[in-house]
C-alpha cells in the first residue's frame, strides 16, 4: 500500500469560491471619507459602504 492509496480522502475542494473569472466591480462613494471607490458587490443603499482604508477602521478586531 503506497502513500497515495488512502481511501476516503476526497474533500471536493473549492472552498466556496466561484471560479467565474474577475469580479464585476461597482463604483460607489465611501460613506466615511466620501471618496469614490469600487466594491465587488452592488450597493443596495440601505447600508454604509466603505473604501478599503475606512473598512479596516470599521472592522471589528480579530482575537
Image (cartoon, helix red, strand yellow):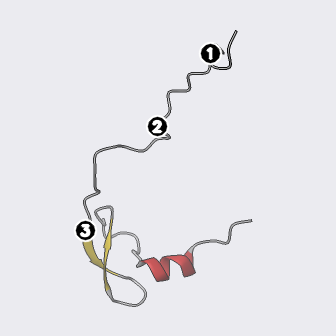
- Secondary element under disc 3, as helix, strand or loop, is strand
Q: Quadrant of the C terminus?
A: bottom right
Q: Mark 1 and mark 3 in contact? Answer it, CB < 8 Å.
A: no
Residue 49: x percent and y percent?
A: 39, 74
- Point out the frontmost of discs 1 and 3: 1
Q: Is residue 59 left or right of residue 22?
A: right
Residue drawn at the location 30% of the way across and 65% of the way down: 44
Q: Residue 43 placed where, x, y %?
A: 31, 67
Instruction: Report how far apart the C-alphas of labels 2 and 1 lie in the structure.
Output: 17 Å
Disc 2 or 1, which lies upstream in sequence?
1
- The numbered mark at residue 60 is none
Q: Which residue position holds label 2?
A: 14
Mark 2, residues whose alpha carbon is within 10 Å: few (<14), some, or many (≥20)?
few
> Is 31 situated above or below 23?
below
CA gap, disc 1 and disc 3: 42 Å
| Residue linked to disc 3 | 26
Which residue is painted at 40% across and 90% down in the image?
A: 33
Amino acid at each position: 500500500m503506497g502513500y497515495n492509496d488512502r481511501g476516503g480522502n476526497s474533500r471536493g475542494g473549492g472552498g466556496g469560491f466561484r471560479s467565474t473569472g474577475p469580479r464585476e466591480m461597482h463604483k460607489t462613494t465611501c460613506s466615511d471619507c466620501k471618496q469614490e471607490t469600487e466594491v465587488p458587490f452592488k450597493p443596495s443603499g440601505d447600508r454604509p459602504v466603505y473604501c478599503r482604508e475606512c473598512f479596516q477602521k470599521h472592522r471589528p478586531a480579530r482575537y
